[in-house]
Image (cartoon, grey):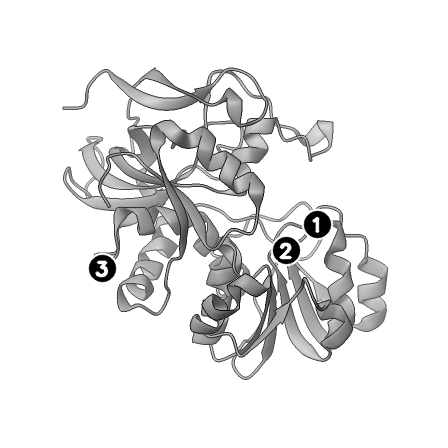
Amino acid sequence: MAPKTMKAIQQHAFGGPDVLHYENAPVPEMQAGEVLVRVHAVGLNPPDWYLRDGYKMLPPEWQPKVSFPVILGTDISGVIEAVADDVKDFAAGDEVYSMVRFPSGLAGGSRAYAEYVAVPVKEIARKPKMISHEQAAAAPMSLLTAWQFLIEEGHDVQNPLQQHKHEPVPLKGKTVLVNGAAGGVGHFALQLAKWKGARVIAVGSGVHEAFLRELGADEFIDYTKTAAEEVVRDVDLVVDAVGGPTTGRFLRTLKRGGALFPIFPLGFSGAEEAKKLGVMVSTTQVRSSGAQLQQLATLLDRGVIRVAIDSTFALQDARKAHERAAQGHIRGKIVLSVTGEG
């Protein structure tokens, strides 16, 4: 039986990493259709610091209303402590991983930086057996993002940022450029594209070249020395894992009929240029899916997809983990260890 209180990272105001406090919080109560997970590890993602800061990069009308205290985080791996009466497919003792309530928890409803979290059963999957809890926690959001952009969207929720539905494009025999290839989404996108038979050009800083070639990159461009948009032409797809206002520079690298997928699309202003060049620009918002995580568990167990961990911090050191994230040049993912076990 779970205790009444737990340790968690809470914040009581928006701000930098110093607003993150390790303190007591109530253990969440399960609702119908949920399981209570004792968390072993937590994966960090950009929405964590966006929420911590108060979503300053969004227009005011898009900023969600937040009630304090807030517990950040979405990605967890752990062991089921208890299940609601109506849950039949999982039981206490099952090892699971999940991206919890995203994007529905954008205002702080996911609550993963904690010893326990209640998770809707439709959002959990059995943890891959061949990897650690830390590796499993590092996967969900970044790997689901790469999967939903490149392989299967898996939902019919219309993206409000574009009129057309996002559709993955065929990858076999195609040339794919991945910008930000060493990061969380980037290193998974590279591996998925290779798995589907694409030739991959990886763009990253020079210190990551050996790492990216080991993951399967056919060509590497060190952006600190060479601007990819100046030397690359006629690729079929660009996955810009960095995104933002500068993503339009990759339009010139694409052949007519090609596609640009900015993972972070805000600030893109090249719609007219893309139309003239005959290039499709498309994006989607990652959504929780236990069914897709179960598919991905097979690939993770087989070693088809590898999880890279940049660094690991104890839960109480979440502030230091956010400081590491702010330094940039992350190789893979940052993880919080909750139980001290791998």
- Residue 321, quarter of picture: top left
| Residue sitting at x 21%, y 39% | 79
Q: Give the mark nearer the N terminus: 1 vs 3.
A: 3
- Picture coordinates of residue 95 (x, y %)? 21, 45
Residue 206 appears left or right of 212: right
- Picture coordinates of residue 96 (x, y %)? 26, 45
Q: Amino acid at mark 2?
A: Thr
| Residues packed near mark 1 inside 10 Å, few (<14), some (14 to 19) or many (20 plus) | some
- Residue 144, quarter of picture: bottom left
Task: Say if residue 279 shows up in the picture.
Answer: no
Residue 233 appears left or right of 146: right
Per the model, the C-alpha gap separating discs 1 and 3 is 36 Å
Residue 14 in the image: above or below residue 145: above
Q: Amino acid at mark 1?
A: Gly
- Picture coordinates of residue 254 (x, y %)? 72, 74
The residue labelled by disc 3 is 130
| Residue sitting at x 65%, y 76% | 236
The residue labelled by disc 2 is 283
> Mark on residue 244?
1
- Picture coordinates of residue 142 (x, y %)? 47, 52
Choose between 205 and 154: the one closer to the eye: 205
Choose between 135 and 78: the one closer to the eye: 135
Closer to the eye: label 2 or 3: 3
| Residues packed near mark 2 inside 10 Å, few (<14), some (14 to 19) or many (20 plus) | many
| Residue sitting at x 82%, y 66% | 275
| Residue sitting at x 52%, y 22% | 18
> Is the residue under label 3 in contact with that under label 1 (CB below 8 Å)?
no
Secondary structure of the residue carrying numbered label 1: loop
Secondary structure of the residue carrying numbered label 2: loop
